[in-house]
Amino acid sequence: MWGSTPAVNLHLMPLWWRDQRPETISVQALHDGKEIAIKLIWSDPTNDHLAIRPQDFRDAAAMEFSINPEDPPFFGMGEGIHGAEVNIWMWKSERQADLEPAFQDLDKQYPNLGIDSYPNTQRSPLEQPTRNALTLGSDPTFVTAWGAGNIVADPTRKSPAEDLSASGFGTLKAHPMEDQHVAATGVYGTGSYRVIFRRPLDVRVEGNVTLRPGTTHPVAFAIWDGSAQDRDGKKSITIWQDLVIEK
């Protein structure tokens, strides 16, 4: 199916200039009237999927949609005025690796570490964590972000994709877990990534872009290269492009 789908090659520009960078991203899109799938392909000489140490950074990809298709805001995370929100779908390589085969905890990087642990109220006294207890053996109450419902910190989450919203710099936020409608799968091989995003076309939840056959939507793309220490706003981007959803 993808073999017969036309691809569009878009140029990428690093926000922090460097000579070694991803030059282009290939984009394909399909829909069946109910769900849309968008495939991204880009070159990357390294597979950076472990981001446990503070000096390490992941590879990642994201798409940004203007909530208002008629008047898209500034493509850099939207604008802080009414109606200038953007919906962002993001895939992260280390979250993909967490699913294949298991969550990458601290012992992946530091096999000989010792950990002070808190009591786990979800277990009996005989099953309390030891000094070698890791994240999955902890009570979420004492892993603050996980206990607060932050999807980024949830080690049990079974998706490498995040459904996000923003309306200007410093406003990026994840949708609640029950409103996470984006799925994604990514693979690395022969010096490149292939990531497929999927989502129902019509998601009527605040902060989600509504996509319908016969419409055109502004969309922009971003790529992070962990080996180049890309993170947050340090990335390679496109400007707004037109996503035409055929009837």
Image (tube, rainbow, N blue to C red):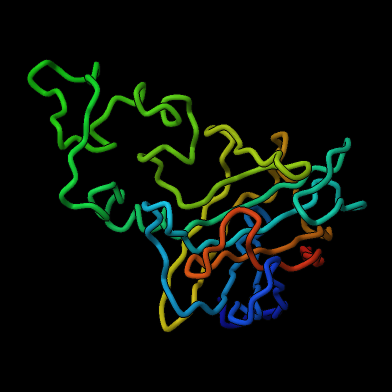
* Residue at the far right in the pictured view: 71
Q: Quadrant of residue 51?
A: bottom left
Q: Is residue 162 left or right of residue 86?
A: left
Judge from the rendering whether residue 187 lies leftward or rightward of residue 72; answer left or right.
Answer: left
Image location of residue 140, percent across then percent down: 35, 26
Classify residue 150 as left or right of residue 140: right
Can you give x and y, in whole percent of width and height, for residue 55 in the image? 43, 57
From the viewer's perspective, is residue 21 above or below residue 151?
below
Q: Position of residue 224 (x, y in %)?
A: 57, 64
Q: What residue do we see at 70% from left, 80% from top?
A: 9
Q: Is residue 98 above or below residue 148?
A: below
Q: Residue at x 61, y 53 (%)?
A: 232
Identity of the residue furthest to the front in this view: 55
Q: Position of residue 74 (x, y in %)?
A: 85, 54
Instruction: Determine the image quadrant of residue 208.
Output: top right
| 119 sits left or right of 206 in the view | left
Q: Quadrant of the C terminus?
A: bottom right
On-image quarter of the N terminus: bottom right
Q: How many marks?
A: 0
**Residue at screen point 58% across, 43% down:** 181
Is 55 or 5 nearer to us in this picture? 55
